[in-house]
Every structure is written in C-alpha cells, then in structure tokens.
Amino acid sequence: MTAHSPQTAPTPATAATEAGTLLGATLVVPLNRLKASPRNARKTPHAPATLEALAASIRAKGVLQPPVVEIERKPDGQPTGAYLVTIGERRRQALRLLAKRKAIKRSHPVRVTVDETNDAHEISLDENVTREAMHPADQFEAFRRVAEEKGWGPEEIGARFGVSAQTVRQRLRLGAVAPDLIAAYRAGDLSLDQLMAFGVSDDGARQQQVFEQIGPHAPPYAVRRAMTETKVRADDRRARFIGHAAYEAAGGVILRDLFTEDGGGWLEDAALLDRLVTEKLTDLAKNARAREGWAWVEAHADFPHGTGYGRVWPEPVERSEAEISAVAALAEAYDRLVAEADEDGLTPEQDARLEEIDKALQDHGPDVAYRPDDLARSGLIVTLGHDGLARFERGLVRAEDALRPSDPDATGTDTGIDAAEDAASGTGDEAPGHEADEELAPLSERLVMDLTAHRTAGLRAALAAAPTVALTAVVHALVLQLFYAGHEQATPLQVRLIRTGLERLAPGVMEGPGGRALAEQGEAWAARLPAKPKDLWAVLTALPGSEVLDLLAYCAALGLNAVRDPHDRRPAAWAQAELLATALSLDMTAVWSPTAASYFSRVSKARMLEAVTEARDAAEAERIAGFRKTDMAEAAERLVEGKGWLPILLRTAPAEADTVLEPDDASASEDEAGSAAVDPDAYPFAAE
C-alpha cells in the first residue's frame, strides 16, 4: 500500500530536517518513528471499533489526511530521530494495527506535516473541538450513492469503510427513506429512532402515507406498528408453524427489521400464510387418519370449543406373560446401555445396539390403544397451538355417535339390573306355555317405590357413616360426567357437575398455561381409567386414598366458575372465590400478563395511567399521558412488563388480610359481598 502523494514530493526525513531546517514542511517518516504526543488533548482511549473502521479505510484508500507532528528532542534540544503526533493519533494507532496484522511493514512510510510554531496542546484541542461531524442523513445518502454509482454490495462497502455489512444495510435503508422524512430528520423534527421505524419497510409511498397520518410526534413503536399493520409478525404462531423457508418457497416475502438485534420482521402475505397453515393442518389430519384409523378427522387453526364433543380414551393393551417379560427385558437393556454411556456419549456400537432395542420395542406396539369400536365412532381434530406446534385431539365423539344401540353399556342389557326389575314387576320373558301363578303377581309400582325409598334411606345412613366410600361415590359420579359421555345417569348419587366453557368468554384461554395444565392432567387420568364405565367403581376402590383425592381435586377444578358475568350476578360466590384464591395462594402472574391486547386497549386511559403509576412511578405515567389510546396501550405494556403488576380483579389477598363472609347471608349486597382484596364495584360492568 502506498500513501497518497501531495502536489510536490515530500522530503524524506534526514538529519537536516530533523534539525529543524524544514519546519512546516511535509515529510515522509517511517511508521516506527512516530510516537504518541504527551501534549495531545485527547486522553480517553479510542474505541476498538473506531480503530477497526479507520484501519479498513486506510488499507483501501491510504492515509487521506497527513498527521501533524513535532520533532521529539533530547533535554539538550537535539532531535532524537522520532516524531510526536500532535494531531492524528487515531491514524497512527490504525496504522500500527495494520502493521501488527502484517498488512504493512513496521517501517511503512507515512506522510506527515511538521508544526512547531503553534502550541501542540492547543492545536490538538482545536482539532477535536472545532471540527463538525457529518450529519447522519448525509452519511446515509452518501452510502446509497456509493452503492448505486460503484455497484458495490454491503460486504464490499463495509470492508472499505471498516463497518459490518449489517450496518451498511441499515444505512442504505435509511438513505432510501422518503425525501420528506429525510428533510424532517435534518430539520430536527424526526429523531433517528423514528426514522428507523419508518425504515422498517423500503416502501417510500407507504412511509409518506404513514407520516402524513400520524405526524412527526408519534413514538417509534407507533410508527413501526402503522408501517406493518397489515403484515404478520415473524414470531407469530402461524409463521413458526409453517417456517420462514416454506413460506418464502411458496412465494411469500418477509420484511426484515434491520434495526433490531434479533433481526425480527413481518410476513407480507397474510392470506398466503393462512392458506399454508390450513393445508399443513389438513395434511397432518389426513395422515393421522390413514395411520391410526379414525372415523373422521378435521383441521382447525383453533379448537372448536362449545361443540359438545364427548371423548373416548385408549386402554392398556393386553399382553401375554411372555410378551410382558420380553418388553421388560428390552427396557432394562435400554436403560443399562444409557447408564453406561460416558461423558463423550455413546460409542458407535452402543448407539447401534440402542437402535436395535428401540426397533424391537416398537415392534411390540404401544402400551395403550383405542378399541376398534371406539375408533369406528370417534375422530381426531388437529389444531394450531399458541406455541406454533400442531396439537392432536384424539378420541373425540360427536353427539350423534355418543351412544349406539349396539353398545351394551348404553342399554344396560348386560348389567343384570333390567332383569331384576323385570322379575319384580313380572314383565320378564317366560318359557313357552308357562302360565303365571296368581300368587306371584307383579309388585305394584307404588310398592316398588316404597321399598326402594326405604332402601335409599338405608343407603344414605350407611354412606354417611362411611366417609371413604362416600368419597369414592362422589368421585365416581363426577368422573362419569367428565370422562364417559352418555353415561352421566349411571350413578344413584345426585351430584351434578356444571361445566362453564371459558373459551367462548375469553378466546384462547384454554391454550394458555392454566388451560394446558388442566388438559394434561385430564389426559393423564384418562389413560388410567377403564374403557367401560361399569368397570370404573372397581378401579376407584382399588386406588389409594391420596389418589382418589387427587382425582376429586381435578373434577372439582373443572366445575369451578368464578367468572363475573353481568347476566349471572352471584356476589356471594364471587366473594367465596376470593377466599379460595387466598387459601390456594393463587399467583396470576404465572398464567397471565398485561398486554395491549389482553388489557390496556380494553380500558380507559385513566386505568392505563393508574397501572403505569402503580408498576413504575407517576413520572412514567405523566410521560405517556398525552399519547393517543392505541399508542398509550402499547407504551403501558412495555412499561409494566416484568414488574408483576396485575389488575385488581386478578390480585390475591394475603391470608392474614382475609375478611370472612357469612355463607348464609343471601341478602348481602354486591358491595358487602366483595372480599378484602377486591371491591366488586372497582370494575363496573360496561360495554367495551
């Protein structure tokens, strides 16, 4: 590399020049004879990034401006042969960086200007104080011009100016922003953050349109939202399900946000994305039907709650003693191999053996399976979960398929109960030619009712004296309702569980942490319960008492309804729900968080400012007080994020602050029924 030459050839450094005979002249000095000046006004070290950038520029274009130096002298005034850099220390360090990397020699010639007339400290200060950096807008447009005139890409430009290709892409995008917006930025009417928000898209017409709609004072996040309101976020569950590569392969375009660290963006074609989601879900459903043999399958982006599906569950597969032993031996061998693995993992031989064992286990089939008659009347629905993964809801039974005449459990013909009733009433089948004996006339309906009433009283007394059996009977009645569609009446216990569908009240609630936790518990219990309801009692009586209580807790949980419905005012029940929350130490921050969509956009500005004040402070609330409602909602979401703030309806009172409500006070007003933690009138019902 050679430095740029001046109009007249510079004088090489000699003894004469070192003696000062050519003061003010331009010299060529070896790099290793340039030293830092102790009189340089800048004491803070240069950032490594700026040295990298300058080194790249020097390597591509040479030293464009010669450093200013003074001659280093001994105490007696004689030159030492070195030069102190008064102006241009960053250039000297960038050259030394290139020399360290062997890009140039340590003795590389450097053109310098000697100045011993002016005070070295003063001119160093002058150099740093009086110069003015290029306006960023000029830089953005200059980068764009270089790209257009030279035809260089971001990598080439970045290499020549010592910046990353991503930085070049950002500057090129900003250089392409609509001229009116660049002018507003130059005039100080737009901040750099606002300009970057407009620059998320290179659509100049859209930039101009949004600028005219929301003006120059909108916060950056509001600008970004307006620029992308018709697009789908790159982290949307649909985008994660399809995958960006598949979306782009189908002709979709992704708008990348060049100004965020995570490189987020938006999918431009929402209709294409929805079509791809539907097609993929449908293919998954069809494949599952062909593989598993369901009577019907459906695909939905969201589960069709409220359709009243029943459910059938798989049951354990019966195996011979030999097969059970073989499976146990294979499982033991598998576990032993895994335990023997060292820190480096499995050896090729161990890995191959594990594959053999795994294949052998698969050949034995699953431990649980659906009965053929259940498969013949049930189906599967494939939906898209909130995490972007497909969810398979198996064993769903439509209302018209819930009970069939051929189902012995539906008719009760194999239970012996109908036969006993026929014998009592005299309506059973008789052998041909047999004549009924008048002394064995059927019992009257009134007498049957009388006798069974006495039996019921006896059963009640006996059950009241046997709490363990009573617990099992209650759980039996609840489980029949939850797990055995169409068999709710197969119990003498008149315990009814009313289930309120929450999905119609708050769409997506069952896809949240709470809903999924309940679903997983239900699936685990269903796998343990028998396929036929007539076998349920025997299974329940064989369970340990602690597990019966666990099952009761699950059933009771599904019957809980603490929804404050304006058409179903139950102040005493609401108050009891608060006491229950305290007893359970309920922490709603684990299952709900305040966002613009879930809360802030649905309340008044005053409520939003109240939330920000409580979560942060009054100053933050005052800062956003002048925002429009939609902008304030997004600002409030970010301000309260991670602060553990909850609306008053979701807060739980500590145990010591509870106020006990008399359960028989049916005349309590709604104000009186409120718990110590929540005032029922704090959020009066109103149309959103």
Image (tube, grey):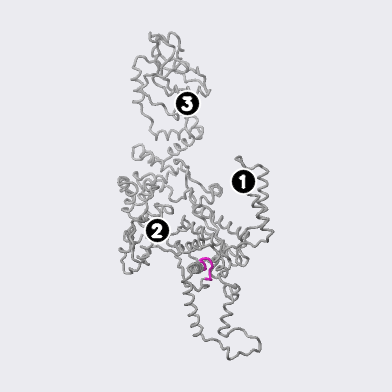
SS at badge 2: helix
319 versus 127 height, above or below: below
**Which quarter of the image is occupied by the C terminus?**
bottom left
Which residue matches tag 2?
583
Give the mark nearer the N terminus: 3 vs 2. Answer: 3
Dot label at residue 339: 1
> Label 3, on which residue?
55
Residue closest to the far front: 465
| Residue 65 point in image, percent of width and height | 42, 22
Cα distance between the residues tagged 2 and 1: 43 Å
Q: Residue at x 54, y 86 (%)?
A: 443
Q: Residue at x 50, y 69 (%)?
A: 469
Q: Is residue 481 visible?
A: no
Q: Please, what is the three-letter code of the amino acid marked with disc 1?
A: Ala
Q: Is residue 67 left or right of residue 358?
A: left
Q: CA distance from mark 3 to mark 2?
A: 67 Å
N-term mark: 2 or 1: 1
- The magenta segment: 479-487
**Label ID, residue 170:** none
Secondary structure under badge 3?
Answer: helix
| Between marks 3 and 1 in the image, the one whose residue lies nearer the viewer | 1
